[in-house]
Image (cartoon, rainbow, N blue to C red):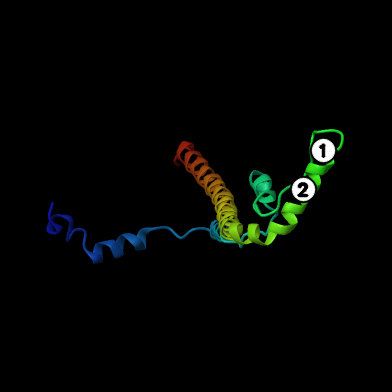
Amino acid sequence: MRPEDLLSTTPGAERLAQHTQEVPEPSAEQVEALRQLLAASQRAQAETEWPPLLQAPRTKKDSRYAETPTSHRTGVVGPALVTAKRAFRLVFQPFINEMLRKQVEFNESILDSLSLLYEQQREESRAQAAWRREVSERLAALERTRKEPSP
């Protein structure tokens, strides 16, 4: 297909202008309803808490810090192992922090991105629902006018 095949000269601009003059003016209620719908769909995103889907990963995003060391062993061995684990963490925590710093930054950025995507999807769903209601109402109005007998 060539570009010349896509271009057309009919209908002309004058004819289109005539047709636009024939389009009836919408009622004031319709104009106001459309303004309200547009305003509702363009409102700023509400600052909300983290989505439930991301609550658990958010608590685990900082992988530098481990849970408190424990041991299932009894007697002298269990407390000795816990003390050794604590001493190891105390000595090596700066190295652990530096080794995992980039991982923590990555985790935070991924969670922020996922949260943003989640909020955008929610807003898009709200807007689509509003438009769907508007289209359904318009369709019902058209069907009512079509079913009414003409004088």
Q: Which quarter of the figure is the C terminus placed in?
A: top left
Q: Amino acid at mark 2?
A: Ala
Is disc 1 in contact with disc 2, using a CB cutoff of under 8 Å? no
Total numbered labels placed on residues in the image:
2
Q: Give the residue number, with chain letter if any, for mark 1.
A: 78
Residue 63 place in picture, x, y as percent: 65, 52
Residue 98 horizontal/vertical position (percent): 61, 62
Q: Earlier in the sequence, mark 1 or mark 2?
A: 1
Along the viewing direction, whichever of 101 and 83 lies nearer the viewer: 83
Q: Given the image, on which type of amino acid does mark 1 rest?
A: Gly
Q: Secondary structure at mark 2?
A: helix
Q: Extreme right residue here?
A: 75
Closer to the camera, 69 or 131? 69
Label 1 packing within 10 angstroms: few (<14), some (14-19), many (20+): some
Residue 40 in sight in this render? no
Left or right of 36 in this view: 91: right
Q: Nearer the viewer, residue 101 or 131?
A: 101
Image coordinates for residue 89, horizontal then vertical, percent: 72, 53
Mark 1 lies on a secondary structure that is helix
Label placed on residue 129: none
From this view, report whether residue 126 is shown above or below residue 21: above
Q: Which residue is mark 2?
A: 84
Q: Residues within 10 Å of mark 2 (few under 14, many from 20)?
A: few
Q: Which quadrant would residue 92 be assigned to in this image? A: bottom right
In the displayed structure, 113 sits above or below 149; it is below
| Residue 99 rendering spot, x and y as whole percentages | 59, 58
Q: Is residue 64 visible from the viewing direction of this image?
A: yes
How far apart are the alpha carbons under marks 1 and 2? 10 Å
Q: Residue at x 54, y 57 (%)?
A: 34
